[in-house]
Amino acid sequence: MKRLLDKFASTGEEYDKIFEKRRAEGISPVDKERWKLLMKYYKEGKLLDVGCLDSEIPELMDSKNYVGIDISPKAINEMRKKYPDAYYHIKSLVDHYDEYDYLIMGEFLEHVEDPKKEVELAFKLLKQGGILAISAPFNETIAGDVDGIHHMWSLDFNDLAEFCSPLATKVENGIITAEPGKPYHHPLMVSFWKKN
């Protein structure tokens, strides 16, 4: 794990602006592919999407079982309108231990101060046998190369194994490649872990 930024750079106000920009430009095909892939092992039950922003995952499931968390108040308010059966909130990941069957951290861990701590908390929130699905830029080398100056960490599969393996069994790892020169041009890693 390589640190790219010295201090936390993601705020609700900043992600309100990112949400507005993404809404104006439209959802990228890479995001649509990533959301479908992150749902690969979802069968049924309650799902928590951490850092959901403008996720279309509620369209891929019974949205009554969907819970989305984000730091962008604008995103949460707009997504509540778009998916009224789903549940959205701005809240930390506490007080709901052993509640979720499936938990997604899509493009989340690279933004937080302590990724290992967030993964440990995710496994507390999952029921026994629940799945944690993670996506993140793979081996990002320069701060700002992928998402402006928002990513604190460069991660790889070894980092995810260090975070997850004491608490879970690896199900699968994979890479989503993107076209050079496109707005999102960095390869993404996707990793699935089943809680022990």
Image: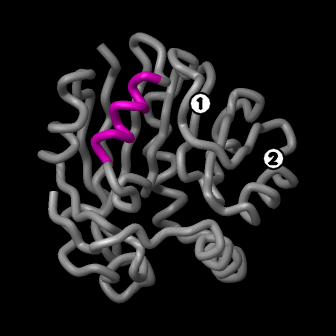
Q: Nearer the viewer, residue 103 or 14?
A: 14
Q: Can you give x and y, in whole percent of width and height, for residue 2 in the image?
A: 16, 64
* Residue segment shown in magenta: 115-124
Who's the residue at 26% across and 27% down the image? Answer: 171
**Which residue reaches farthest bottom?**
181
Who's the residue at 28% across and 54% down the image? Answer: 189
Q: Quadrant of the C terminus?
A: top left
Who's the residue at 52% across and 19% down the image? Answer: 97
Q: Nearer the viewer, residue 115 or 59?
A: 115
For disc 1, the marked residue is: 47
User: Secondary structure under badge 1?
Assistant: strand
Q: Can you give x and y, in whole percent of width and height, for residue 18 in the image?
A: 60, 76
Q: Is residue 77 left or right of residue 99?
A: right
Give the Cα distance between marks 1 and 2: 14 Å
Q: Main secondary structure of the magenta part?
A: helix
For disc 2, the marked residue is: 83
